[in-house]
Each structure stands twice: as structure tokens, then as C-alpha cells.
Image (cartoon, rainbow, N blue to C red):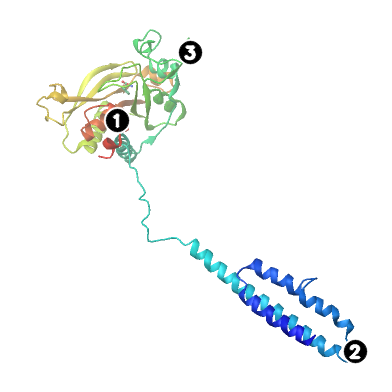
Amino acid sequence: MKEQLATIRQQALSALEAAGSAQELEALRVQYLGKKGELTSVLKMMGKLSPEERPAMGQLANSVREALETAIEERGRVLEAQALEQRLKDEALDITIPGKPVKIGHRHPMYIALDELKEIFIGMGFTVLDGPEVELASYNFDKLNAGEGHPSRDWSDTFYFDTDSRVMLRSQTSPMQVRAMETMPLPIRIIAPGRVYRKDEVDATHSPMFHQVEGMVIDKNVTMADLKGTLNMMVEKLYGKGTQTRFRPHHFPFTEPSCEMDVQCHKCGGVGCPTCKGEGWIELLGAGMIHPRVLEMSGIDPEVYSGWAFGIGLERTAMRQFKIADLRLIFENDVRFLEQF
Ligand code: PHE
């Protein structure tokens, strides 16, 4: 029995030493220490020994079992460490491979122009408003003194949603004048940028959707001189000191008097060239003193308060600023074009 135990011990230890995986190790544990294992069967034979032999043999058997258990545990730890090492090797990342470059976009030229405009007016104490593109005809027309029969209400000019012409895509940002007057405390200084819609064919200077920025001031003793001063300052900040402007009489139903403002052509400096169609000037915006009836309709006393408003086309502003010849480039979103700004 003594020899048997010694053989088991020796064989088991060398087999354990050679075990290459956790499964192999477990198989060996069952083979020696399991219920029907080799060591277990030897232990079962203990009962046949004489009482004198039993203690010494028992001790020996126990020490063999302990030796095997320790060996299994140790081998287990070694195999675990090896497995971890292998996994780390397999899953290693080569951090020296250059990463994919991140493409950073940039602002659209029209939004660069808008941001500059916002900055100019915020600097003068104006608030920036946002308003609905789907608008009531009463705000787009009636409350702006363009009642039934006004030519701009025509079905061939305006996108209506309903057959009785009450809901529409706004044709101008001017309804924001009314929305501001109805909701804001006086005095009011606002700009309101946004999309507007008209039934126009697309060409180099037209699009059925384009952007405007509305501006409005209402206070006591506001005059046309304030309007001109503010717009001249805006033009100098946008296009550089000394840029010449020209105010021409015009007509809008909601302003009286009304005007259009031109800036001197950036291409020819006012002599006349193809860019300005030989005029020397380029039209930039419409403006005027708010019509007393418009103030009154929005609940403001025209005897106490006066105001001015303007509406500037944003695409045209950007086109002039960046010397873009065709309006369609603004909407096509061709990266080769956009990347230049
Ligand atoms: N809403 C006018 C247009 O679209 C522009 C404008 C705005 C004129 C404010 C006067 C005052 O043509």
C-alpha cells in the first residue's frame, strides 16, 4: 500500500505538472481525487489494515492528498496566469496606427453673414426673435396694412395651405413686427431672422425659399434719422468703413414713408459694371417708418410712439460679402464651394 501511494503521488504530480489547460487539470483531479479516483480507492482499502498499521498509513495517505491538492491549486494559478497573458496578447491594440482624421465642418457663408448681423444688433441692445414660418395671413398681410385685394396676397405669389387663404407660408419676416408689438413691452428693439417663401422660379437671383432678417425699433421720438444712422452703421460694420449707401423712395403698405437702401457696388465702386447692371449701386433692403395704422392695429398709440423697420435679404447680404455670383450656390451645399469660406 505504501508503494501504491508513492506511485500515485509521483505519477499524479508529474501529470499535473504537464497539464496544459484548466480542463486537463480538472480531469486529473477527478482521476485521482474524485469519488472513484485512484487515491480514493486506496483510501477505501484502509479498513482492511491492522489497527497498528492504520495510523501511519492514514498519515501517509493524507499527506499524498494534501500534496496533490496543493499541486492542483498551484498549477491552476499558473494556467490562469498563462491564459490571461495569452488573452492580453491576442487582444492587444496597436496604438501606433494613426487614427482616422476627424472632419470638422464649418459655418455656411450665409450663417457667417447672419452671425455678424446678429452681433452688430445685439451690440446695440436688440433682442433676437424667432417666429413661425407657417403664418396666418392676418399677420402676414392684414395687420401689416395689406388688406383684401392687395396684389401681394395673390395666389400666384403666395403659398396657401387652405382654400380660404387664411394659413400660409410667410412671404416676409414682417409679421414678426406684429408678433413683437403684440407681446413685448415698449420700447421694442428686435431683429427676427428666418425663412420666407414666394412663388418664384429658381434663377441666379431668385428662389422660392430664401431668408430675411427683420429689424424694428419702437420708442418715443424715433425718427427716420435713427433708421438711416442705424443702417449706415450696419453697412460699415458689414462691408467696411466708408461704404456708401443710398436711400430711394419706395412703397410698402406697412411703412410710411418707405424706402429702399442701396450700397455702392463693391465691384466697380459706383462707376457701373455687369455686377450692378451698370447702376453703380446694389439694392440691399427695404425699410421705412412704421405706418401709424399698423401701430394702432397692434394696440400702440401712434400719437405717443413711433418706430421704424427694415427687412434685409440674407442671401444677398452674404453674396455681397463673399462676392458670390449665383444665389443657387448658397443652397446647393456643394462642399467644394462651401469649403472656401
Ligand atoms: N417685408 C418687406 C419685403 O419683404 C421688407 C420691409 C421690411 C420693408 C420692413 C419695410 C420694413 O420686401
Tag 3: amino acid: Asp
Of the image marks 3 and 1, the number of the one nearer the N terminus: 3
Give the residue drawn at x 62%, y 77%: 17
- Mark 1, Cα crowd under 10 Å, few <14 / some 14-19 / many 20+, is some
Q: Is 236 displayed left or right of 34 in the figure?
A: left
Q: Is 281 displayed left or right of 289 in the figure?
A: left
Give the residue drawn at x 45%, y 25%: 182
Q: Position of residue 89 (x, y in %)?
A: 49, 65
Tag 2: amino acid: Pro
Q: Nearer the viewer, residue 1 or 189?
A: 1
- Mark 2, Cα crowd under 10 Å, few <14 / some 14-19 / many 20+, is few
Q: Is 84 displayed left or right of 217 in the figure?
A: right
Q: Secondary structure at mark 3?
A: loop
Q: Is residue 141 above or below residue 285?
A: above
**How much space separates mark 1 and mark 2, taking CA atoms?**
106 Å
Q: Nearer the viewer, residue 289 or 57?
A: 57
Q: Which residue is disc 2 drawn over?
A: 51
Q: Position of residue 312 (x, y in %)?
A: 29, 27
Give the residue drawn at x 23%, y 34%: 321
The quadrant where residue 225 appears: top left
Tag 1: amino acid: Ile
Of the image marks 1 and 2, the number of the one nearer the N terminus: 2
The quadrant where residue 303 appears: top left
Q: Is residue 284 above or below residue 65?
A: above
Disc 1 residue: CB within 8 Å of ligand 1: no
**How much space separates mark 2 and mark 3, taking CA atoms?**
111 Å
Disc 2 residue: CB within 8 Å of ligand 1: no
Q: Which residue is disc 3 drawn over?
A: 162
Q: Which residue is disc 1 drawn over?
A: 330
